[in-house]
Amino acid sequence: MDISTSERQVHAYLDTLKNLRHLAPLTISSYRRDLAELSAMAATLEPRRELTDLASLQIRRFTSQMHGRGLDPRSIARKLSAWRGFFSWLAEQDAVHVNPVDGVKAPRRGAPLPKALSTDDAVRLVSGAANVDIDQTIQHGCDHAMFELLYSSGLRVSELAALDIRYTKNIHHQSVGWIDIEGAEVIVTGKGSKMRSVPVGRAALSAIEHWLAMRSSVANADPDALFLSTRGSRISVRLIQLRLKAHAIRIGIPANVHPHVLRHSFASHLLQSSGDLRAVQEMLGHATITSTQVYTALDFQRLAQVYDAAHPRAKKKS
């Protein structure tokens, strides 16, 4: 196809962006690349077409081709925006009567996979709270017990903050969550006011028992709350978040660590070891299996990375 007409139109359009709309040079370079890609794809059509001859059908085909090559939906959306602007300008020049990009949308971006720590980093994070080079303060003991329990049982941070030492019901307070040391389990109230029981591992139980021995010396302590602030009140969700993040930075964990990362890590690592999706669903307190299945994708992604790195037939040719 003789694309000289298309080339002239693209050049004139870019001149308009530079001289009349005063767009930045980097923006114009991005438009140039996107329109060059459009021209390259148009050149593959049979019969060959000028850019002004393209219809919505071809634009949709190009979009599918880019998606099939693995191009990120955000990048596809940017290219469509550049093409749409070009054809709008052509319409102003009476070169086209219909903008073929109108109504064409980029594929939806899939929901991002939850971020989980590696097993080594997760263990280092929670066990590191017992070995930080600081005094064995009350806050230190509380933090260690909280972090171990988050990873051991996959609790939501709100569920952790609401835990009591034992079940209590009186005119002032009724427990919505509590620890059962003898039963090695924690009972929590999750979303939809649904209660569930989750096992607690030995390391977390040991850290909690150590914390309970320290807790007895806290002045003005809340009589019910399992975990306390330095003032003795029930610990807040925000304070748990801040303490965990500070601890991760202190021991050099290379990630933006927050309590939900430990919940994701709990689910991913348990699923890797057991393969029991239903059990993981029950322990997380998910209403449907669909919410839990995202960890299957996360586990497959990890396995795919191992495969790509190790299998001789998976390696890309250089």
Image: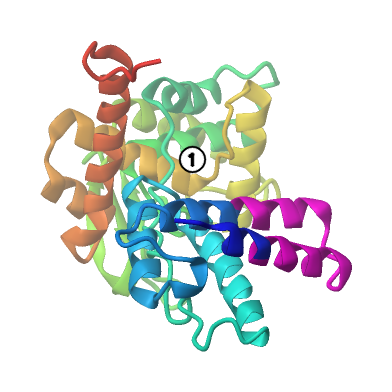
Relative placement, left or right, of 148 versus 134 is left
Instruction: Classify the position of the N terminus by image quarter.
Output: bottom left
**Is residue 239 visible from the viewing direction of this image?**
yes
Instruction: Classify the position of the C terminus by image quarter.
Output: top left
Amino acid marked by disc 1: Met
Residue 65, how many percent across, how many down? 34, 54
Front-most of 214 and 300? 300
Residue 63, how many percent across, how many down? 39, 61
What secondary structure do most residues of the magenta stretch adopt? helix
Tell me where residue 202 sits by quadrant: top left
Front-most of 132 and 268? 268
Relative placement, left or right, of 9 versus 107 is right
Q: What element carries label 1?
A: helix
Residue at horizontal 54 percent and vertical 83 percent from the top = 96
The boundaries of the magenta stretch are 9-33
Look at mark 1 in the image and give the residue it sits on.
146
**Is residue 220 visible from the viewing direction of this image?**
no
Residue 174, how many percent across, how many down? 39, 70
Seen in the picture, residue 14 relative to 112 is either above or below; the reply is: below
Front-most of 174 and 317? 317
Residue at horizontal 44 percent and vertical 73 percent from the top = 53
The stretch drawn in magenta includes residue 117: no
Residue 188, how many percent across, how many down? 32, 58
